[in-house]
Structure formats: C-alpha cells, structure tokens
Image: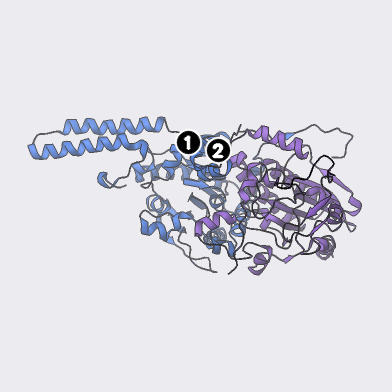
Chain colours: A purple, B blue
Amino acid sequence: MKKESVEDLEVNLTGEEPVSEGGEIKPKWYKRIRKGITTSSTDKRETPEGLWSKCPECNYILTSAELKENLYVCPKCNYHHRIGSEEYYDFLFDGEEYIELFDNIQSKDFLNFTDLKNYQKRLDEIHSKTNLKDSMRIATGKVNGEGIVIACMDFEFIGGSLGSVMGEKFSRAVDYCIENKLPFLVISKSGGARMMESAFSLMQLAKTSGKLSQLSDAKLPFISLLTDPTFGGISASFGMLGDLNIAEPGALIGFAGPRVIKETIKKDLPEGFQRSEFLLEHGFLDFIVDRKKLKDQLSQLIILFRN
Amino acid sequence: MPEYPNRQFLDFEQPIKVLYEEIEKLKQTAEKSKIDMSDSIQKLQDAIIDKRREITEHLTPWQRVQLSRHPDRPYTLKYIDNIFTDFVELHGDRNVKDDKAMVGGFAQLNGETVMVIGQQKGNNTKMRQLRNFGMANPEGYRKALRLMRLAEKFNKPVITLVDTPGAFPGLEAEERGQGEAIARNIYEMIRLKVPIIVVIIGEGASGGAFGIGVGDRTLMMENTWYTVISPESCSSILWRSWDKKEVAAEQLRLTATDMKGFGLVDEIVNEPLGGAHWSYTEAADILKTFLEKNIKELKSIDPQTRVNNRIEKYGKMGFWEELIVDSTEEQ
C-alpha cells in the first residue's frame, strides 16, 4: 500500500514561516542553495524574482504569468496551488470587480497571549508583511451576472486560523446576505482554530452556527467550498454545514491533522486519506469542482437554487 | 470515593498522603499497644482538612488541569447516580454502533424527566480502553444528537456533562466524518427548542467538548478546564516542545474563574475542599442545586425566546478592533 505523505499542518498555526518538508507550502522561486558551483558571480545574470514557478507536485516549470492565466492550476498534473482571497476574488467576480465588506475589523490581543512571541506583535508583523487584517475577507459582487457574497480565507494569516475576527466577519456577512437576499459562498483554507485566542476562538463555532441557522430560516443558499487544507474548527463547524459542501481536487480536509492521527494510531496513513476524493467517497461532499470550472458551476447553482 | 489505601495522590497532594500514612501508623500502634490514640488521629484528620484547604487556595492553572484528570475524580455516570433517579441508559446512533465514550438517557431530577448526556471515562485500565478515554467517535456525537432530538420531541430539558480530552483522532473517525458530526451537533444544539444546560465536570477540550457543549447555560466546576486545545498540544505546537504545558495552561486562561470573567461560561460550581474526588456525594449535591435553579429559570422562558437568546449569547462572544471608516466610503 502506498502511504500518504504527512504534512505537519499545525505548524502553520504558529504564525511563523512554515519550514517545508516534502510538500511545499508555497511555490518557491529558484535559488542556489549549494555553493558547489564556483562560476564567477561577478558577471552572473540574476533572474528576476517571481518569474518562474515550479509545481510542487510534478516539478513542471512555467512562468508565473502562465500559472496565473491557468488560475494557479498546474497545466500538467492539475495540481491546485494554494492561493489567497485576492486571487479567488479576481477570477470569480465579473471583471475583477467587487466591494470588500467589513474590512475595518481587525484582531487584537485581548488575552495578552505570549508564546514564543507576543500575539499582538505577531499580528502587527503579519499585517505589515501581507497587508491582510485577518485570515478572512468578505466581498460582494457578481458571478456571471449573479449577485453573491463570498467569504474567503487567507492561509498566509496564521494558517487561516479561526478567531474572533473571522467569527464576526462571517456573522456580518450572513446579515448582509439576509438583508440583500444574496447567496453565501465560503471558501475555506485553514489549519483550525486560533490558539492565541483560546476559548474565544472555540466559541466562534457556535457563533457562526447561530448565524447559519438564521441564513437557513431566510432560505438563502450557503455553499461551502473546501480547499487545501481545511482542518479542525472549520471542518467542525460551518465548513461542513453547507447546503452544499464542495471541494477542489486533491485538497486535504479533515478534523484531526494527519500528523496527530498518525501518532495516535501508530500506523502510516493510506494513500489519498483525507483528500477531497476520499471525502466524496465517504459521503461528505456533494461534488469536487475544478478551479477552472468553479465560476460557471457557481452561477449555475445559484440559478438552480432560485428558479 | 476510594478509601485510603486505594486512594491516588497527585504530586502536589503528597503532603496529604504523608498524613494518611501517619494515621495508619498510629492506628496500628494503638491496636498493638491497646492505647487510645483517637485524639492524635483526630488531630491528623484535621490537618488533612487544613491541607486540602491550603492546596485549594494555591492551585495553579496547570494543577487545576491535573485535578480535572484526577484518577479518583467522579465521571459522568457517577454524577448521574448521585443526582438523578430512574436513569434509563439509551444506546446507539442508529447508524454505525454504540459509542461507549458517550453515554446518555432519560432520568428524573426531583421527579421531573430530563435527558442527560455526557462523555464517560473509565476508572481502571480495562474500562479506560472500553470508554476510549472519554474520546468519542462520530457515532458518539450522533447518538448524543439523537437523544437531544428525542428530548426535544417530548419537551424535556437536556443536561450535558462534559469530560473529554478531545474527540478521537482516528482513521475511522475521519472516514465517518468527525468534523461533520461535531459541526452538526453545534448547529442543532444552537436551535434546539428545549432548555440545554452544559456542565464542564472535568476536561473541556475543544471541539470534542463543544460537540455536546452548546447551551442556554454553561456551568464549569471549580477544578476543570475548558478551551480550544489541551495545554500539552498547545505547548507542542506553539512552543515546539512538550515541556511548556504549565506556561501554556497559564497563557490559555482555561480555568473556571477566567472563563467566567470572560463571560464565556455563566456559573462556577464549587467543589468539595481539595476537589470533587474528596466526596462524590457532596460534589453531586452541590451540582444538583445548580441544575435545579437553572432548569427552573430556563423553563419559564418561551422556546423561541430561549433559542434567540442562545444565538445572541454566542453572537456576542469574541474580541476585535473596529477601525473608524470614512463615511464617504462604501460600507
């Protein structure tokens, strides 16, 4: 039996740069690591950063422009790169036009939580590096002419972790959907709950469920799109509560992280374990959707729900 | 609770063990020499009470975590025995199997029927395995939900007793949708039409606890913990070492006092001096008065208001900063 390579997802929740082992977190640009080659570097031509991209799955190399054109999907092996809210919004909303909502809400360190670094310091640093205020953004616009509200997570921001801000933005997004009679799509990509907010982050599971209950009473569709990776508090709440639960191909989705399971059962995990296809097989997804078909599929669903 | 020779002591309870040993010695001497030692024994017994008080007054968050896992601590079925009458245990999720880590059934509280549900740990090696250390699989959560719906149908209040180191992180648990099972419970509990009282009686570990942990009132017993991750796992992830569990326990603010201070739980249920393991009946009696009071209060509210209040209560939880937005801007 081929075994599944185990990615340590929890490390993303620390808010530190992930040290990649096996599966790379981000496509890395070419860099000379070994100093074995001793060509004179005085007249060496540097390749500009970010021009080329290598598929972490099949090592296929293409230009970044080509990759973007292909919606960050490998043209050779169909590997879906992990992308952020900006990228999703740009290709999902018509003409890349959308209004961002509730972007004035940001995290604060209420508990004065300090692990290897103080939480507030961590927040400030990530904000200045990524320009993101938290791990979820909300936007509204049109998808093939159909109005929708899309909440999307950014894995870059402490592993897309669920904290108070995500809970509050999610809640306001639902209120906005109800007020404007719009369907709600949530694109999940998260390692789980944010430990630096302790029990407050756990309570967001009930907070968001309460709002979904109101959305349900308003008979507005809620579609949950799970992308690579979605774990912990997200899969134990709204991630699995969609009227439709759908996922991108090959995405890792589960409650407990693969490393934890491996340590618990003291066995290697079977190939494909916790992948989208595994979840579909076990009855937890409605279907798997290719990123390139996502937009059309989405507008089609909105019409099916409405007419 | 077990009598002295079978009693177990945590590291910081060792001074009490020493006192017990002295009592034993005195008893033996008294027997051998036929001298009345009851005064000295009484003094030592008083000293034990003093020691219990002293320990209680200086507990660190980590020690509370240890107490919540005390091997002699009463578990769910022990509370059920001591608080309720006519308990009829109901089994199975009607789909896969009966999860022994989750128990539940109808019972009477002062002549009134309630549905009581909780995680169950075992008190010896064999039972611990049978109960899977109080770590439920998806079918455990689905059994709990089935029982809650049954309670809703017959308009009976639900009482859940939470005591788990987490939902089970296993291969089959994932196959059968551990995440979905917990998510579904949280969603259904927030809109259940009957009153729900949640009591953290031991360990309140994250989603595994919250899967039966949404309610109108959440009570936390004095020596329990409740947060998003165990201090050990938190230490291993954030500090990259298993040795920082004490620090993690402090940083997580997981004690009943902290949780009450944050408004995330409603009441703290006091325990017998030194912890619930010192007297099962006393611990149960105290909890019983809390349950009676809360059920009475909740029953006087009409169901729709109760559900709205519940949604509102959780809706207020969280902290964030809201920046002032230029009024000319959209939203």
In the displayed orientation, state which residue is furthest to the left.
Answer: B33
Label drawn at residue A45: none
Query: Counting residues from the N terminus, which is met first, the one under dot 2 or under dot 1?
Result: 1
* Res A165 visible: yes
The Cα–Cα distance between marks 2 and 1, rounded to whole angstroms, is: 9 Å
At which x and y percent is residue A164? 67, 41
Q: Is A149 on the left or on the right of B310, as rendered?
A: right
SS under mark 1 = helix
Residue that numbered label 1 is attached to: B61
Are the residues at dot 2 and dot 1 in contact (C-beta closer than 8 Å)? yes
SS under mark 2 = helix
* Amino acid type of the residue that numbered disc 1 sits on in the rendered structure: Pro
* Quarter where residue B8 is shown: top left
At which x and y percent is residue A66? 86, 56
Instruction: Please identify the quadrant where the C terminus of chain A is shown.
Output: bottom right
Q: Is B222 on the left or on the right of B253, as rendered?
A: left
At which x and y percent is residue B243? 49, 40
Label drawn at residue B252: 2
The correct choice, above or below, for B108 with respect to A249 in the image is above
Q: Nearer the viewer, residue A173 or B228?
A: B228
* Amino acid type of the residue that numbered disc 2 sits on in the rendered structure: Leu
